[in-house]
Amino acid sequence: MGSSVVIAAALLVGSWFPIAGGTWTPEQGVTSQLQSTLQPYVVAHASAQHLVLQPWSSYSFQYQGRGSADGKFIFINAFCSSPDAYAAKQFLQVLDGGTCYFELKYNPKTKTFYDLGFNGVA
């Protein structure tokens, strides 16, 4: 019974899921910095494009360290559908869905985001 409570708690909307298989593992300090600065960046860019975001608390995030030693970045995939066990292991890819889905990259060396892309609407 206790393990199903832990699993259910780990799959709440608003969670961050590290996805295995990247070229490096981001340290806690790097992911904390990323998480604290992500919302203002995404909100500003959505506003500049006249896009309306879902309530921020409805998003969940998957991330993975990618790149080589001289070009490390963290790939971030965001979605506002309810996460399931798959979301904790594999990237969720959706072709439409509007601002409910977006992805971007974070450079831990410069502490900057780039390549933000919102999904279209079919």
Image (cartoon, rainbow, N blue to C red):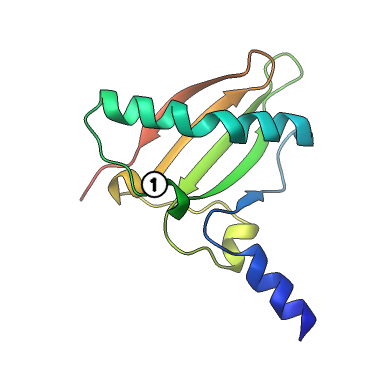
- Percent position (x, y) of residue 116? 42, 28
The crowd level at tag 1 (other Cα within 10 Å; few <14, some 14-19, many 20+) is: many
Image quarter of residue 52: top left
Q: Nearer the viewer, residue 28 or 19?
A: 28
Image quarter of residue 108: top right
Image quarter of residue 84: bottom right
Residue visible at 64% across and 13% down in the picture: 110
Indicate whether 22 appears above or below 105.
below
Q: Can residue 24 be seen at all in this image of the molecule?
A: no
Q: Is residue 110 left or right of residue 113?
A: right
Residue visible at 69% across and 22% down in the picture: 72
Q: Is residue 52 left or right of residue 12?
A: left
Indicate whether 21 appears above or below 12.
above
Indicate whether 99 appears above or below 105.
below
Q: Can residue 90 be seen at all in this image of the molecule?
A: yes
Report the number of numbered marks: 1
Q: Is residue 69 left or right of residue 37?
A: right
Name the residue tied to disc 1: 101
Q: Quadrant of the N terminus?
A: bottom right
Residue visible at 22% across and 47% down in the picture: 121
Residue at the outermost bottom position: 1
Q: Nearer the viewer, residue 108 or 65?
A: 108
Type of amino acid at the residue the image marks with label 1: Tyr
- Percent position (x, y) of residue 96? 30, 49
Regarding mark 1 in the picture, which secondary structure is present there?
Answer: strand
Residue visible at 69% across and 15% down in the picture: 109
- Percent position (x, y) of residue 38? 52, 32
- Percent position (x, y) of residue 11? 60, 64
